[in-house]
Image (tube, rainbow, N blue to C red):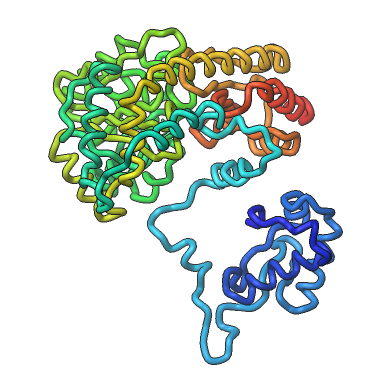
Amino acid sequence: MANEWKPDRSSEQPIYKQIVLYFEKQIRNGELPPLSKLPSERKLSKDLGVNRSTVATAYAELSASDLITSKKGSGTVVRGSNRAYPGGQMPNWNRMLIAGTLLPNVPIIQRIAEETNHKHLIDIATGQLSPELFPNQQFQHILKNQTFDHPLSYEHPHGNLKLRETIARHLKIDKKIECTPSSILITSGAQQALHLIIQCLLKPGDAVAIEDPSYTYSLPIFRSLGIKTILLEVDENGVNPNDIHNAYINHRIRMIFLSPAYQNPTGAVLHPERRKKILKTAFEFGIPIVEDDPYSLLSFENEREATLKSEDSHGVVIYISSLSKMVSSGIRIGWILAPKQIVERLSDARQQIDFGSSIFSDWLAREFLNSDFYEPHLRQLKIELKIRRDLLVSAIEKHLPGQVEYTVPKGGIHLWCRIRQNHHDEKLFNRAVDKGVIYTPGIALGSKKGCVRFTFGRAAKESIDTAISAFSNALFEQK
Ligand SMILES: Cc1ncc(COP(=O)(O)O)c(C=O)c1O
């Protein structure tokens, strides 16, 4: 919470006093209402890079001024109650925090999000590219040399037409998927695409099948909407078509969510035979498949993985992809390819949420995809990712010999490991964070205990070995 602010070391005001004023101001102006939690002394001193005694002195002064109170077990909180004000009462923010229909992320995901803000940690947790892998210079070139002459009004409800035309062309050339621009809806990343589909096309009580482990598993939206998830185990060839068959027979699943190419987190690719069987089963029972495909172009062996959509001769697949893993995650460009009435329905929902996509992001994405930069960037990115994958594998062999089981992924950005040694997932995670590395415990992505996801696309090349060495120290220390 406090990590965006740092004390001014050049100021004549003592650091403890700056901390006092920092909190006092926020308590008085309502940013920190009664019962708000303050960070522990240990955490704040780490965040601010100051001695713990400095924080203790600041907290003691705030406490003496009756602004905060510390209790064993519940930590330090802002004093007062919601009703303690003469002539009025404070809104009960704490009650509201648990009142919404969209549930919060599970604590381990929240913890990862929070910890990855700490610059001192080596990040092999976050599912995105390392800063130097993004095409920054190419974007700057476009911004300098291309004229942005688009009207500044809201964008078309489906997203910019020229971007949709570009994506339709890209789908045809790169993925052998035929479509027209009016079957495409631009979204704010694949994340929004998933949310729109789940919110608009399913209802409470429906059952859906999702991969286990998977990124989809980590989304609270299913629980938020009262949708039952049937787990399909992922092995090195993806999910088993028989499991889908059984899920339909036993639970009447209404939708299947699959990420068949370099799946997050396992890196698995759905076997071509399984692909065919799954399409057949989906058609036989009339179950739509949502194919989430952010990774299929990130192949290290120069053969592009076929998608379900490219073989979907009956039209049972809703296809999602995004620029996040191959160009930029911050540009927030994703897309859905679906039957036209579905695109209309989802676009209507998108209008209700935020009136559609950003003219600027749509324009930049279109310019980049149409430029001479795109192909060479993708080629270079795959080379760089492969180097990182190999560094990660070497580091695992060096620091964790015989300790983990894994399949070397042939594309994507993640490597999934099962740790042979018995361990406690959360305790191991805490130890690793203390040793300077953050990764994703498998429990955040599925039901299996004892597994971890290492993302090789995120960390700088030089730090991958250090990260695995730190992880190994954390693992061995807990014996
Ligand atoms: C399989 C999968 N789907 C969707 C997303 C969401 O990505 P974005 O919204 O950035 O496109 C991710 C991100 O890690 C992912 O791995």
User: Which is more toward the observer, 286 or 91?
Assistant: 91
The image shows a total of numbered marks equal to 0
Q: Residue furthest right?
A: 53
Ligand 1 shown in quarter = top left
Left or right of residue 14, residue 150 in this image = left
Residue 82 image point, x, y percent: 56, 78
The answer, for residue 65, to whether it is visible in the render is yes
The answer, for residue 252, to whether it is visible in the render is no
Looking at the figure, which quarter contains the N terminus? bottom right
Q: Identify the residue at image location x=41%, y=39%.
A: 331
User: Which is more toward the observer, 253 or 218?
Assistant: 218
Q: Identify the residue at image location x=57%, y=91%.
A: 86
Question: Residue 438 falls in which quadrant of the image?
Answer: top right
Left or right of residue 318, residue 430 in this image = right
Residue 160 image point, x, y percent: 24, 40
Q: Identify the residue at image location x=73%, y=17%.
A: 399
Residue 374 image point, x, y percent: 38, 22
**Image height of 115 relative to 76, above or below:** above
Q: Residue furthest bottom?
A: 87
Left or right of residue 177, residue 65 in this image = right
Question: Residue 178 falls in which quadrant of the image?
Answer: top left
**Image height of 357 relative to 126, above or below:** below
Looking at the figure, which quarter contains the C terminus? top right
Q: Identify the residue at image location x=65%, y=63%.
A: 37
Residue 253 image point, x, y percent: 26, 34
**Image height of 123 relative to 27, above or below:** above
User: Which is more toward the observer, 285 or 360?
Assistant: 360
